[in-house]
Amino acid sequence: MKTWPLLTAVSLFVFYVTTLHAKPQAAESQIQLANVASKRPNVLFIAVDDMRCDLGCYGAAHVQSPNIDRLSTTSVLFKRAYCQQAVCNPSRVSLLTGLRPDTTRVWDLVTEMRTVSPAVVTLPQYFRQNGYRSVAYGKIFHNPFPDAASWDEPTHNAQGVVAYSQKNVQALAEYRQQMRSEGKPQNAIDRMRGPAAEAQEQPDERNFDGKQTSDALRKMKELAEAESPFFLAVGYIRPHLPFITPKQYWDLYDRATLPLAENPQIPKGMPPVAFGDRNLGGFYELRGYMDFANAPTPFEQPLSESQQRELRHGYYASVSFVDAQVGRLIAGLDELGLTDNTIVVFWSDHGWKLGEHGSWCKQTLFELDTHAPLIIRAPGAKANGTKTEALVEFVDIYPTLCELAGLPVPKTLEGVSLKPLLDGTAATVKDAAFSQFPRKQDGRDYMGYAMRTDRYRYIEWLDAQNGEIIARELYDHKNDSAENENIADRSELESLLAELHSQMWKTLPRPSFPHPQIQPAATVSAGGTEAKPALTWNNADKPIPTAKPAGDYLNVTFVNRCPTTVELIWLGPDGTRKSYSTLKSEESFSIRTRPGAVWLLEDSEHNRLGHFVVESKGKSLQAEIPADFRSVIK
């Protein structure tokens, strides 16, 4: 086993002197300790969902996070770390592969990584290949795709825990019944969830995150007794919606004194594509909870003060709940004598809006969504206990852990090692951090790319068909750290914009167009336009089968030939529904989907028009909503 690289000569000298003069039992104990120290370092990999940088150690004095704050005092805290896409599945895949979304080909919540990048070697998988035992608890990859190849055991999920209380389970049932009596469509009823927040009179162990911490601690003890080093990943759900935590964490805060967003307005000069016509800057997620189903959009007005305070209270209570669980994990390392030989990484998949710009949730290219906590403790690292202003990205975590563990860094990775920052031998490792996000606006597809430099956030929105820049954003963090005004249209800044444009595409690989994230409506050949195989249209009188998506992804283009505006909805195997696009007459929408997937079409009143079942007829398929759909019976 290779010696831990940060073990100093001084510590070895002390060990030898001590063992020479120790009693036999003490010497034996010291030898066992030395054997542990001689192993490659373990890795404790802590993932959190939707946590922005509102922590005490990041300067948020109103947040109670004593355990994460304490961890930061023995670690390097990265003040400017950025995810590659501010939504769960793409962000986690990017971090865990060390590759950007345009390389992984994962840009959404429904693409399983192995279907588009089957040969990729993930971070825990690479450690497995190099003698580590890799084990996961909770949410590391996106929940539906735990990626068995990455782990030595199936991902563990806490059992016997409580989600909503029975009171709110009943409240949701009554709310859904009310929706039925009001004639609301079934898909809207199925999408509805309970309240966005709930304080529960129960111990931590009855909550998913509390129970899985106990489970992970038992596994940590088991792994500590094994010969091989371990890569133990623990992923927390909170502070993701709904904010369900034990009441004791709510009691840490006085709701009336919590600070509210100082900029509850849309940024001046923001192009509409930045929020999207259906995404609403991620706000649509909040509307899936029964007490916020009718909340005004960011384009109308902010939420009421009482609503804002309730959400902030629930969010911070959730942060404090997770903080307590992180404290238990760190204490577990100490109790088992593992601290001096375990790398600790604490990260969140992206940030979150708490009323800034009138919005909530994530899924934009703003600083609030792409900026997230990152804390790394490498035993013996010279910079431990400091905070760095260096720009870093989540794709940098993979090569960093490889180098800290003494493993060769795969040449395919797109990040750089942060070890020079941990060693204190460098102040920076890169000049910019990059994020991206796909967007649907007025029936057309776009891909946005953001570059964060020391001073600026520069964003280009590109037409996904031809690569044309349709909008730009520029925020000057020296004078506008809250990103309240887009100054990209100022004529005196044209030279700066040109410079930033050049820097972006010299550093970031420019994609081909049409962008791989979409598929053109037709394939053009020398003889003209080649028609795609057509999927069968099923009218509303046909029963909807259970979705059974399986196999390789296909490219399907939905084309609306009828005069009615239609909503395109993906049905999950468990009956869940996810709206993907609203298509006006003659508009199209392209997406990758698998054979056996079911896509439902509804009109603007949520009446069911019909559905498609994806069939294996080729790699690119056409799904046309007929002009007179009621007369077409299949």
Image: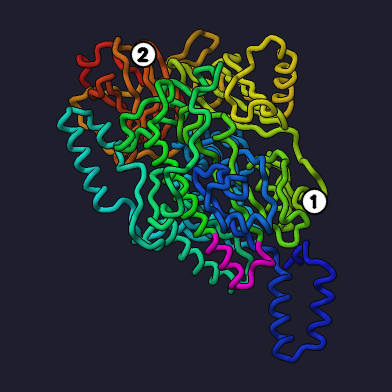
Q: Is residue 261 left or right of residue 382?
A: left
Q: Residue at x 55, y 56 (%)?
A: 233
The residue at which mark 2 appears reads as 584
**Where residue 79 sits in the image (x, y, percent)?**
66, 43
Asked if residue 232 can be seen in this view, the reply is yes
Q: Residue at x 54, y 67 (%)?
A: 220
Residue type (three-letter) at the residue carrying disc 1: Gly
Q: Tell whether position 565 is magenta.
A: no
Question: In 3D space, how far apart are the residues under numbered discs 1 and 2 (Cα atoms)?
Answer: 56 Å
Quadrant of the drawing holding the N terminus: bottom right
Q: Residue at x 41, y 58 (%)?
A: 248
Q: Residue at x 36, y 45 (%)?
A: 197
Measured along the vertical axis of the image, is residue 354 above or below residue 246? above
Considering depth in this image, is 387 or 84 the residue closer to the camera? 387
Question: Circle 2 sits in a helix, a strand or a loop, which is it?
Answer: loop
Question: Circle 1 sits in a helix, a strand or a loop, which is it?
Answer: loop
Asked which colour scheme the image uses, the reply is: rainbow
